[in-house]
Image (cartoon, grey):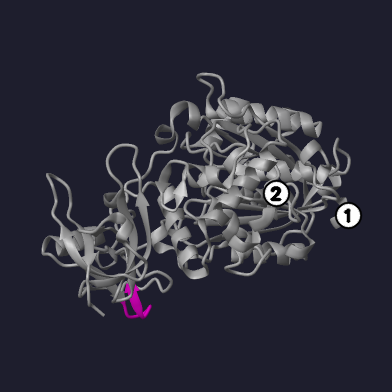
């Protein structure tokens, strides 16, 4: 009565056996995405367990939770899903839109080389990398892709 | 949600803090405290009775901690869940469960914001999102604008129909002495105002004001012995479909479809029985989307539904009777004010804007960029 029971274990307390130590990830999903962009590619992930593309890039697939995300490179064609023209208090108006990329994922972007008001829902568009300035990371933009189906 | 009793708790106190442009150097917690004091007075309770604190503000990272310290209530049960403007409808659901589980006996839900005084950027700093920030979306307006672009594209919703939402809100606001806006508004005024993010002009977008407030909840048996007619919580629902607009599953179909279905099921009522409607109108498209998603008209018909003054004080459906976020008050997370107005309508305290025979209210909060939807169904004594 009154004695504590102390569990005795073989291993040294505080030390986890080596097979249970998970190595840190070598690269974050965002870093992989940016290195694709630096090569001029639009990288995205595909999850076999989910059965479709995943965007933005993650460490596990949504819904299934599987760590089965494979990196793929888009062909770079898409369709404008939604669009707006932002009117800032300083500077000219500019486009912001959502693009449905053909491989089955949606991303925010803008359509360049045409007036922001000329961007329409349903317009076919083609990816290109926005050239970074200074320390800025590259990011994907799109241009009108006349005739692309 | 199951496990709670329909009508098991009631709102027994409700009050705004100072609104509009508050005194210099007032803090968000000052406004919470002011609202709590007024709401407790309204309920006939005192601070010493309070043992549950639910709160949210964008201006204090640990707002429950700040509020506990300010009020001197170290043993209070706390919950500072924050999902944007619908946080307070979520708090009602959490308070309902906490009261019934005996975790607290007098629950206060509070909000405070000084965003007009300190500026929107200081009050609610945007997090950097590497997949969105480079495109300079003017958030949250740009996100709602893109949802509006889809609604116009798919259903033929017009600029004039969206403007009719702003005009109706203004007509209600002119009946509310506490409303920020004091002058009439026309459809032409909305269309010709300064463009912000197409299709929206500044008149399609909620106000930028200071403000706060509080509501008080207790279990139904106690509520019946307090000052006012209890306003019972009949049902709640919640659905968070995304955080950023890029991940919204369908831009014309909000989580209100699911949160509303949950709340209607719990309350055992349907939209056709509701006579007070409080919808989070951060943008004119919101009112149209939520009227559809909560069953007041079919999907895609929201624009046509609001034509002809249907949701004005002279119309057939009383929507946003305080003047809404568009014309009454919008300190950044507006959801608490929906609850305060619904309580007043169900008590019959609304004077010139009182809805005749108000008995059943749908309160619908919206957070983020159409992200966090939370529905609360409230009713007077005849509904329990």
Residue B125, located in which quarter of the rendered image?
top left
What residue is drawn where x is 12% and y is 65%?
A: A40
Q: Nearer the viewer, residue B72 or B371?
A: B371
Q: Which mark is residue B312?
A: 2
Between marks 2 and 1 in the image, the one whose residue lies nearer the viewer:
2
Whether A48 is among the magenta residues is yes
**Position above or below: B114 against A86:** above
- Image position of B58 (left or right of B127): right
Q: Which mark is residue B246?
A: none
Residue found at the far top of this picture: B24
* Residue drawn at 86 percent across, 47 percent down: B221
Provide the chain ID for the residue under circle 2: B
Q: What is the chain letter for disc 1? A: B
Residue A75 image-quadrant placement: bottom left
Magenta-drawn segment: A47-53
Give x and y (percent) for residue B379.
80, 53
Q: Secondary structure at mark 2?
A: loop
Q: Which residue is mark 1?
A: B382
- Contact (Cβ within 8 Å) of mark 2 with mark 1: no
Q: Nearer the viewer, residue A39 or B302?
A: B302
Residue located 42% across and 45% down the image: B195
Give SS at disc 1.
Answer: helix
From the top left corner, tell me how far across and down residue B119 is, in percent. 43, 30
Figure quadrant of the C terminus of chain B:
bottom right
Q: Do marks 2 and 1 share a subunit?
A: yes
Q: Residue A105 or B303: which is nearer the viewer?
A: B303
Q: Where's the N terminus of chain B, which quadrant?
A: bottom right
Pick the residue in front: B193 or B113.
B193
The relative height of residue B195 versus residue B258 in the rendered view (above or below) is: above
Q: Residue A108, image x and y in percent?
A: 32, 60
- Residue B250, position as x, y percentages in the image: 47, 68
């Amino acid at each position: 009565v009154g004695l504590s029971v102390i569990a005795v274990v073989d291993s040294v307390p505080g030390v986890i056996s080596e097979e249970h130590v998970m190595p840190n990830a070598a690269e974050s999903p965002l870093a992989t995405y940016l290195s694709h962009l630096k090569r001029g590619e639009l990288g995205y992930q595909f999850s076999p367990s989910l059965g479709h593309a995943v965007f933005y890039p993650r460490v596990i697939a949504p819904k299934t939770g599987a760590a089965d995300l494979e990196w793929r490179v888009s062909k770079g064609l898409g369709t404008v899903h939604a669009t707006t023209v932002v009117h800032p208090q300083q500077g000219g108006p500019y486009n912001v839109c959502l693009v449905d990329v053909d491989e089955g994922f949606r991303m925010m972007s803008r359509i360049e080389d045409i007036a922001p008001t000329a961007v329409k829902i349903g317009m076919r568009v083609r990816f290109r990398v926005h050239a970074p300035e200074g320390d800025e990371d590259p990011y994907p933009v799109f241009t009108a892709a006349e005739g692309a189906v | 949600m199951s496990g709670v009793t329909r009508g098991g708790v009631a709102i027994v106190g409700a009050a705004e803090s100072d609104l509009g442009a508050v005194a210099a150097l007032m803090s968000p917690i000052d406004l919470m405290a002011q609202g709590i004091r007024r709401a407790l007075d309204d309920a006939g309770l005192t601070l010493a009775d309070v043992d549950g604190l639910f709160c949210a503000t964008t201006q204090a990272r640990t707002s429950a901690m700040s509020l506990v310290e300010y009020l001197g209530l170290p043993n209070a049960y706390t919950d500072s869940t924050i999902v944007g403007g619908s946080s307070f409808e979520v708090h009602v659901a959490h308070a309902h469960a906490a009261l019934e589980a005996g975790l607290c006996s007098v629950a206060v839900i509070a909000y405070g914001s000084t965003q007009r005084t300190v500026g929107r950027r200081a009050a609610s700093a945007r997090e950097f999102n590497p997949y969105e920030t480079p495109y300079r979306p003017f958030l949250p307006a740009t996100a709602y604008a893109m949802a509006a672009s889809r609604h116009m594209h798919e259903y033929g919703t017009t600029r004039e129909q969206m403007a009719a939402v702003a005009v109706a809100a203004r007509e209600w606001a002119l009946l509310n002495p506490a409303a920020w806006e004091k002058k009439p508004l026309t459809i032409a005024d909305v269309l010709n105002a300064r463009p912000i993010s197409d299709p929206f002009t500044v008149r399609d977008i909620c106000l930028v004001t200071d403000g706060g407030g509080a509501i008080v909840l207790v279990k139904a048996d106690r509520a019946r012995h307090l000052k006012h007619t209890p306003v019972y919580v009949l049902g709640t629902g919640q659905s968070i479909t995304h955080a950023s607009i890029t991940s919204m599953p369908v831009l014309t179909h909000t989580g209100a479809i699911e949160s509303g279905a949950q709340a209607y099921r719990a309350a055992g009522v349907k939209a056709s029985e509701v006579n007070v409607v409080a919808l989070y109108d951060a943008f004119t498209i919101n009112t149209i989307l939520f009227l559809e998603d909560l069953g007041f008209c079919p999907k895609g018909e929201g624009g046509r539904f609001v034509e002809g003054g249907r949701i004005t004080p002279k119309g057939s459906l009383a929507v946003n009777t305080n003047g809404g976020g568009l014309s009454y008050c919008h300190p950044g997370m507006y959801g608490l004010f929906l609850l305060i107005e619904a309580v007043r309508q169900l008590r019959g305290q609304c004077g010139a804007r009182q809805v005749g025979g108000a008995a059943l209210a749908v309160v619908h909060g919206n957070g983020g960029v159409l992200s966090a939807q939370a529905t609360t169904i409230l009713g007077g004594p005849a509904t329990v």
